[in-house]
Image (tube, helix red, strand yellow):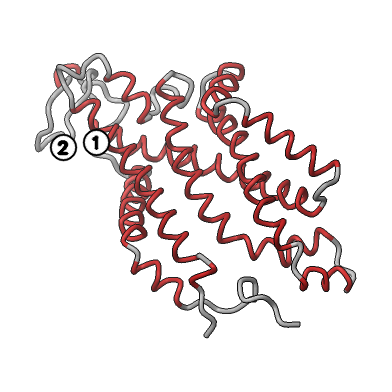
Amino acid sequence: MTLPASTAPVAYPGILSRALASRSFLAGFIGTALVAAIALLSFFWTPYDVTQLVVADRMQPPSAAHWFGTDQFGRDILSMIMVGARTSIAVALVAVGIGMGLGVPLGLLAAARSGGWIDEAVMRGNDLVFAFPSLVIAILITAALGPSALNAIIAIGIFNIPVFARVTRGAALPIWTLDYIRAAQVAGKGASRISVQHILPNIANLLIVQGTIQFSLGILAEAGLSYVGLGAQPPTPSWGRMLAEAQTMVALAPHVAIIPGLAIVVTVLGLNLLGDGLRDALDPRLRRSP
């Protein structure tokens, strides 16, 4: 049986070239790679010890000794940005992994049992989570479990589960109506096997793009939780807590607030541009069979 053009397993050598031709992809890739490289470098080297307090050097402006200046405790802001990048990426990455690891199977299960009680239970559970703002849920969870990076991961990950479940179910439902899925059912394949072998590969591109979007939202959520004191705790640097500590000193030393704010903007913007570029490159309507 001939598979539909949008679902046939063909090679796509043009995906990379289309991605590289996208300005959004290139800009997002460069910004994201830069932040990732800084976070990776922080494991091995930072200009100064982020736990070292040098009161004599407090609130110094950017200089040759301190490229981004120092904060109210005399800590080097560049070093804190580097370690803060590691914290934000780790929290967001693990949280998205939790959301994808649990949400995708739930979405596949709901699509396979469309109209049944399992589908209804999954969707009503999603509606219950979506009834509350994500940041409010994260604050409630971290407030109940205690402020820490681990609890921030749990809180952000829980909200990501229904996002991936809903996206997966919505993308999988139309595929279940195609002829080759019915042929697989006639051949004796079960719902779980069809979901893994036929449904998941055809919606993987959409999930990848959604993953980049949730990754950027995870960065923002981690910064928001740290801003209100519910994220990573001292002495671990966090971009959100750096902003919170700098809010009363903007007039005296604006760089203390501007630098971590720019770090968040560059990271989130880079991930969003990367997601836009990936969406354009992986769009099935742009694929051409060789």
Q: Are marks 2 and 1 in contact (CB under 8 Å)?
A: yes
Where residue 4 appears, as percent x and y from the top left, is 66, 75
Q: Please give the label number shown on residue 78.
A: 1
- Quarter holding residue 183: bottom right
Q: Nearer the viewer, residue 227 or 45?
A: 227
Q: Residue at x 62, y 60 (%)?
A: 203
Outermost residue on the top side: it is 248
Q: Residue at x 86, y 68 (%)?
A: 185
Left or right: 197 in relation to 289: right
Where residue 254 appears, as percent x and y from the top left, is 18, 24
Left or right: 116 in relation to 262: right
Where residue 290 appears, as percent x and y from the top left, is 52, 85
The secondary element bearing badge 1 is classed as helix
Specify which label sits upstream in the sequence, 2 or 1: 2
Amino acid on which the number 1 mark rests in the picture: Leu
Q: Residues within 10 Å of mark 1 (few under 14, many from 20)?
A: many
Q: Please give the label number shown on residue 67.
A: 2
- Quarter holding residue 66: top left
Q: Nearer the viewer, residue 240 or 75?
A: 240
Q: Residue at x 35, y 49 (%)?
A: 270
Amino acid on which the number 2 mark rests in the picture: Trp
Q: Name above or below for residue 155 compared with residue 277.
A: above
Outermost residue on the bottom side: it is 290
The secondary element bearing badge 2 is classed as loop
Q: Residues within 10 Å of mark 2 (few under 14, many from 20)?
A: some
Q: Nearer the viewer, residue 244 or 265?
A: 265
User: Mark 2 and mark 1: span between their CA atoms?
Assistant: 7 Å
Left or right: 92 in relation to 106: left
